[in-house]
Amino acid sequence: MMLHATKNSTTQIHGILIGTSSSSSIQITDAIPICHSAPTKPIVDMGLRLVQASLDKEEIVGWYSGNERAGDNQPSSVSYKLAAQIQALNEKDAAVLVMINSDSFKNMLECHCDDSGRDRGFDVYAVTGNKSDVDMPLSTTNVSLAEGDWKSISGAVAEACLKDNAGVVDFENQLETGAKGLKNKLQEGDWLRNVHVQ
Amino acid sequence: MASSSNSSKQQLDELTKDKSVSPFTILQHISDHKLNEPSLVLKHGLPLRSKKKKMPTSQYLSLLEQLAIAALHSHNVQLGSEIVTEIKSYTGGNSLRYRKLLALCLESAGDIDDAVLIYDDMLSNNPSNTYALKRKYAILRSQLKDIEARQCLNAYLEENGSDAPAWVEMAKTCMEQGDYVGAAFCYEELVLFSPMDTSIHCTLGELYVTIGGKENYILARKHFAQCLEFDKGCIRAMFGLVSAAESYLDLMEKETGDKKKKKEWDEQDVELVRDLKAYGVQNLIKSYKGSTMAGLVETILSNESN
């Protein structure tokens, strides 16, 4: 997510969150970048279908977004609707909506993230289909890491984001290369796996 | 446009590597090609300030103007204000170019209210001052005042309807707010300016699919088809065409249960849409053949075709 935001720092970004869910929690295992412009139905629809077809044991559990302007950290109506549709389609109690927070992102890059997860670069919302879902993000105590601690993980993320040519390929990048780009393996860009990101 | 800006940058790289090239040539190149290279401007331009006695006043003032803007782009507000103050000593406080720079300086320093006063004053003297209108819009956008920003841009477009980048900006603003109908209106204006631009047709098609409805699905497939006529390898348009066709057929399936609505669906048109979908699917599978995603694409499109 952070690399997607780093590469497309002057536009909005959107992507799919995959993982597993139980009655009490949602575990996010990966983020798959979809687009770096306003999402439209064909792009979202095809992106969701391709991601769904690539999954084995995991499922689509949510959506992530980053708004274009610094300081614009609230979920847009579009991001919220997309997360709500994922929640409705999966027939689950909730889906996750992750929003890149520009102020927190800046602090994360400067390695100010603390052990509680404050200044990790993003906010998490639980989308249940009620309009009040996006009034406030979940508190840091409701969002935890499966392995490692926030400080060291965010440090590694900051280091990756600050490298030259840091970034990931999204679905829209692949579409932009056209049919000729698909034939050229170097240009193709595997946005589902982004294997160069370790 | 992308290739010409790449070649301008390449030329700039060559100029900066050649030590025999005068700094004036480098600065002129950056200015002529409207390149965003503030660090290079400062690197090559600042030492020239000491040579002001050897330059005509007009050339020196152009240099100062370029340096001031570069300093502000580099977030060096102090240097920017110092240069703007020097410009004032030559031009006086009433010069329009000086006041533009002063307003930019105030914006960079965060003194937005005083910057807006200058722009409002410019507009009171000349209501068509496009520079002031654009800066006011940019200020409102940066302050996240979306409603006021959209009104400001609307007022600008009423007077400057031929400004294509402004229509693109308005479309972007509409899409951010989920107003896809407004965005489609903007792109309809853009397609009049550039009827052979594939990206505009593709985006317009996507907007119509997103808005939804039978008539919009018909419009969408026309734009995707136009895009593919100009660029047969545009996979984005192929996906769009399949999406538009599927949406149309899904709606048809839902409505043909109702006897009244069933009559509104032309059987020939439905067959045409099925053919268009098959065309899109076939071309996508062909385009992805040999790529890492070939199997996935074939799976999702073949499943939907059955």
Image (tube, rainbow, N blue to C red):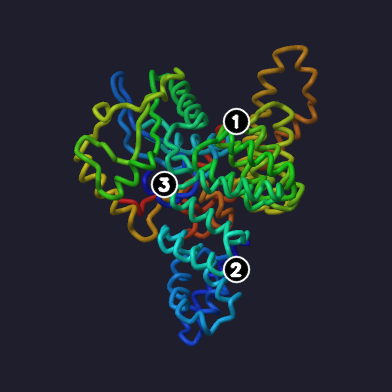
- In the picture of the structure, the residue carrying the numbered disc 2 is B33
**Distance CA(mark 2)–CA(mark 1):** 53 Å
Pick the front one: A138 or B71 = B71
**Distance CA(mark 1)–CA(mark 3):** 38 Å
> Do the dots labelled 2 and 1 sit on one chain?
yes
Task: Please name the amino acid that badge 3 sits on.
Answer: Ala
- Residue for point 70% across, 43% down: B157
Residue B39's x, y, as percent? 44, 67
Label 3 SS: helix
Residue B268's x, y, as percent? 80, 30
Task: Please name the amino acid that badge 1 sits on.
Answer: Asn
Circle nearer the N terminus (2, 1)? 2
Q: Which mark is residue A5?
A: 3
- In the picture of the structure, the residue carrying the numbered disc 1 is B306
Output the chain of dot 3.
Answer: A
Quadrant of the drawing holding the N terminus of chain B: bottom right
